Amino acid sequence: MSTDFKVEIIHKETITPSSPTPPHLKSVNLSFLDQVIPEVYVPLVLFYPNHADQELNSDHQSLIAEKSSILKASLSETLTHFYPLAGEFQYNDSICCDDRGASFIEARVNCRILDILKSPDTEMLKYLFPAAVESTQALTGHLLLVQVNFFECGGMAIAINISHKVADAFTFSRFIKSWSAVALGSISTTDHLVLPAKFGAAVSLYPPQDFLNSPRPLVELTQGKCTTRRFVFDASRIAALKSKAASASVPNPTRVEVVSALIWKCTMEASRSKLGSIRPSLWCQAVNMRRRSGQAFTENLLGNFVWYLAAITVESEVDIQSLVAKFRKCKDDFKGKYPNGLTAEDAYQTIKESGNVLAKEGIDNYSCTSWCWFPFYETNFGWGKPSWVSVRSFQLKDTVLLMDAIDGNGIEASMSFLEEDMAIVESNQELLAYASLNPSVI
C-alpha cells in the first residue's frame, strides 16, 4: 500500500434503537463468564468491491447516501433486538440498556478497494476501524461502533468494533447476520429475519462474583510493542499438515487442531531461540460452550458463553503429532469430567487457579481463538457477499485469531507477538512450508 493512503472522516452520528427498550429489559446482569472477559473491542471488517466498477462521478455521493441510509435504518431496527449493544457498561456488574445508541461513522478512502485486496496490510487496516482493540467504552462512549469506508471505485468496507463485555464471536456473528438480513429485506422482496435474542440468561448458570468487581482485572492483558502478521493456510496445505499430524491417538485431526499445533510449535522454538533455554509453554484455546452446557436453552444464548481449555508442555522436543494429541486430550478430559456441563463452582475454582498460573514468571502463555465456521462470508447487506473478511492489528501479546478463508476450507491466522519474537516466528521454515505470509486476497 502507498504511504499516501488516507482515510477521511466525513460524517459521525449516533444510531439509537428504532423502538425504546421496555422497562423490564433496561438492565442486563453480567454472568461470571462475562465478568472474566477482558474489556476490549472485538474487530471485524468486511470488504465489498463495486462489481459494477463505477468510477468516481456525480452519482458517487448519492450512492454513498443511499447505502448509508440503508445501513443506518437497518442498524436502528436491529438494535431493538440487540438492545444491550446500545447500552452502557457498568463496571463488571451489568449493562444499562438506556438506548444511548451505537456510533456510526462514514469515511472516504483515497484509493481503490482492489489496492488493499492486492496488498493487504494489517497496520493500514487499523485506519478503517472506529476504535482500537485495546480501547474501552470510557474512551469511545459506545459498546458498538461502526465505520463505513467508501473507496474511490465505489467499493465499501464495513468495519465494526463490538465490546467483548457484551458479545463473543457467536453473538457477534448473530448480530451481523441479523443486521444484514434487515438491510437486505429493506431493498429486496425477501422478508428479512431477526433472530431471537436471549441476553442475560447465562446468569442462571454462572452467577456473578463480587471478587471480579474490582477495578483491577483478575488477569492483566499483556501489551507491548507487538506486531501483527497474517498467515494463510490453504486447503491443500492443511490437508498435508493433517496427514503429518495424524497419529494412532488422533487419526483424524481437525484443521484448527493442526494449524494451532504448528503455530504453538513455532512459538516454542522462537522462545528457545531467544532465551537459549526451554520454558514451560501454555496454550489456551477458547471454546464455545453453548452445546457443551447440558442445557438446551443455551444453544442460542447471547452475550459471552465461552470457556478456555489449556494445554501445557514442558518438553524440550515437541512435534505436531504430540501437540495435537495434547489438544485432543484436553477436549476429551473436559467432556469426561463435565458430561453435563461445567458447574459454576468448578468455573470459579478454575479461574482462581488459572490466575495463579498466568501470574507466574517463567511460563510462556499463548491465547488462541477460532472463528472458523462462523458465517461471516455470507454477510449480504444487499450488495453481494464480501470478498474478504479480516481484523485489524492488535497490541495484545501472544494472541492468535483463526478465521475461515473465503473458500471455507483454508484458514487465515492473525498473530500478535512482540517484534523480536515475530521476527523469529515469521522466518520459521516449517511454518512457511504450510502457510503464506500475507498473500494477495485476489
Image (cartoon, rainbow, N blue to C red):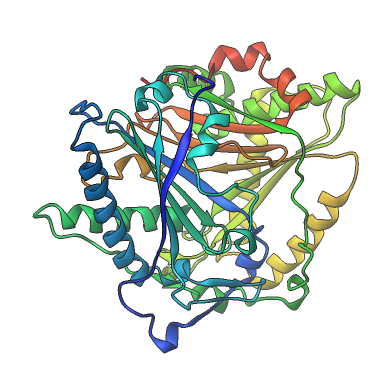
Q: Position of residue 396 (x, y in %)?
A: 69, 42
**Residue 378 sits in quarter:** top left
Farthest-out residue, left: 189
Where is residue 59? Give x, y as percent.
18, 38
Q: Residue at x 60, y 47 (%)?
A: 133
Check the image and name the residue furthest to the front: 58
Q: Is residue 65 visible?
A: yes
Pick the front one: 359 or 79 = 79
Judge left or right: residue 14 versus residue 29.
left
Q: Position of residue 18 (x, y in %)?
A: 30, 72
Residue 114, position as x, y percentages in the image: 35, 23
Q: Nearer the viewer, residue 350 or 105?
A: 105
Quadrant, the C terminus: top left
Tell me: 160 left or right of 393. Answer: left
Which residue of the protein is positioned furthest toward the bottom in this rendering?
A: 23
Q: Is residue 293 above or below residue 274?
A: below
Q: Is residue 42 above or below residue 249?
A: below
Total marks placed: 0
Q: Is residue 22 left or right of residue 276?
A: left
- Could you tell me which residue is drawn at 47 percent across and 36 percent down? 7
Does residue 381 appear in this view? no
The front one of 385 and 340 is 385
Measuring 61% from the left and 56% from the top, which residue is drawn there?
307
